[in-house]
Image (cartoon, rainbow, N blue to C red):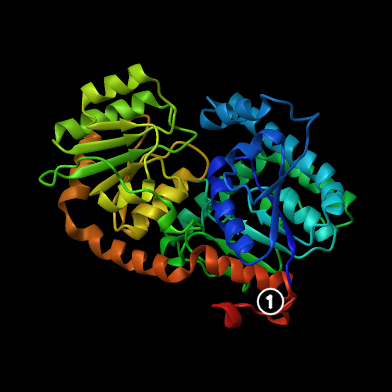
Amino acid sequence: MAKHIGVIAPALPSHFSALQALACELIERGHRVTFLHQPEASRWLSDSRIGFQPLGESSHPPGSLDETLRLAANPGGPLGLKRLIQDMSRTTEMLCREVPRAIETLQIDALLCDQMEAAGGLVGEAMGLPYISVACALPINREPGLPLPVMPMSYQDDPRRQRIYAGSERVYDDLMKPHRRVVARHAAAFGLSPRDGLHECLSPYAQISQTVSGFDFPRRALPKNFYHVGPLRAAPTEEPDLDIPIAQDRPLVFASLGTLQGHRFGVFRRIARACRRIEVQLLLAHCGGLNSNQEQVLEREGATWVRDFVPQRAALARANAVVSHGGLNTVMDALLAHTPILVLPLAFDQPGVAARVVHAGVGLKASARFSNQRALSDKLETLLTYSRFAHPLERLSDEVKAAGGAPRAATIVEKVIDGDPAISPHASAHESLA
C-alpha cells in the first residue's frame, strides 16, 4: 500500500544526495516522499517528483544556510566549532518544534531519519510513527572499544588504546553539550525516556548504513535491525560518460574534495604539484569552489584538466588512484571502482573514514594541512606502484556490489512501513532481510 514518507536530515548536500536516491527508489514503487527542512535546502533536490516542505522560515532566514555551510567547511578553531554546534542545536530545536505540525498537515505515514539529525528519531517516536534511521556518513552507533567516527584514531584492541577511545568520547560529549541539552529537553517535552545524544535517537525498527561491514572497524554490538546496504545511488545509466581525452600511456589521478571543501585552492595546488612531480595525468574537480583564475593556476602547476563538476563514478572507473577529502560517498564509489584512495581528511567524520581506509588496506592517508607536495607524491606513487591494495579493493568491491544499495534499502523501508512483524522493534530482522 502506498505511503507518504517524510525525510528529516541535516542540510548537507551529500546527505540529501544519498537520501534522494533512496527517495526516488521509493517513488518508483508508488510511494510519495517529502523532505522537510529550511527553505534553502530544497536546492539539492533535483527530481521534481520529490516534495519539499519548508520549515523554520523565521528562525532560519535566507542566507543562514550558506553561512552554516561556510562554517562547516572551515570552522577555523574552537570558537568556530562552538558556533557550528550552536547552529546544529538551533536546527534540531526548529525541527522538533515544527515537524510535528507539518506531519499532521501533510498526513505523513512514516519517516526516514538521517542519523546525524536527532529530531527525526525524537519526533518519530513521539508521534508513534514507524521511522527508519539512515547513516549517510559513518554509523554513529557506539561500542565500547571503538573510537567515535569523528576521531582519527586507528583501531587497536588493547587496554591503552581503549582508554584513549574512552577519553576522546568524553571530550566529544563535552563539546556537544549545547546540542545534547536540546535533545534532552525535547525528549522530556515529548514524554520520551531520558536521552541526550544523537546515538540515543536511532530507530528500533531498522537502521540502514551506506557502508559495508568489511570497511568498518570490527563491530561486535550492532543492533539486530542494522543493515549495511552499500552506497545509496541513482542508477548508473543516469550519469553521463567521462568526455575527456585521457592518454593511455600514463596513469590518471582523480582529485575531488567534495562540495563543501571545493574552495581549498592551497590543497589542490599541492596535489597538482605532486602529480607533476611523478608525471601523471590529473583530473581535478572543485565542485564550483574555485574561480577561473585559480583554475588556470592549477593547470600551470600540474593539473591536466580542471573542471567544476565531472561524472564521479565514470572518473573513478577510469582513474588509477583518487585523492579525496574522505567523504563517504566518494570513498564508497572508489571501492566499487577498485580505485586506491589517498585521503586528506578535512572535517566531520573524514578523519574516521581515513582511518578505516588504511585499516581496510584500500589506501593511505595524509594531512591536508601539513603534507607537502613531496609527501603527497610519494604516497600517490605507492598507490600507483604497489599491488598490495588490489586484493582488499577487489574484496570490498564485491561486498559493495552484493550489498543491495538503494533498492535493498527501499525494501527494508517498505517492510517497516507495512508493519511486517519480522521487523518490529521487538524482533530480529536479519533473518528476513539479510
432 or 46, which is in the foreground?
A: 46
Crowding at dot 1, Cα within 10 Å, few <14 / some 14-19 / many 20+, comes out as many
Measured as percent of width and height from the top left, residue 262 is found at 43, 31
Q: Which residue is farthest left?
A: 249
Measured as percent of width and height from the top left, residue 218 is found at 46, 65
How many circles with numbers are drawn on the protein? 1
Left or right: residue 274 compared with residue 265: left
315 or 136, which is in the foreground?
A: 315
User: Residue at position x 62%, y 64% from top?
Assistant: 207
Measured as percent of width and height from the top left, residue 2 is found at 73, 68
- Residue 370 seen in the current view: yes
Residue holding disc 1? 423
- Residue 373 seen in the current view: no
Say above or below: 132 vs 11. Answer: below
Left or right: residue 205 compared with residue 322: right
User: Residue at position x 51%, y 28% from top?
Assistant: 74
321 or 48, which is in the foreground?
A: 48
Left or right: residue 25 compared with residue 35: left
Measured as percent of width and height from the top left, residue 20 is found at 58, 52
The C terminus sits in image quarter? bottom right
Q: Amino acid at mark 1?
A: Ile
Q: Which residue is farthest top?
A: 293
User: Residue at position x 23%, y 35% from top?
Assistant: 375
User: Residue at position x 25%, y 42% from top?
Assistant: 253
Asked which quadrant contains residue 431, the reply is bottom right
Asked which quadrant contains residue 78, the reply is top right
Asked which quadrant contains residue 245, the reply is top left
The N terminus sits in image quarter? bottom right
| Secondary structure beneath label 1 | helix
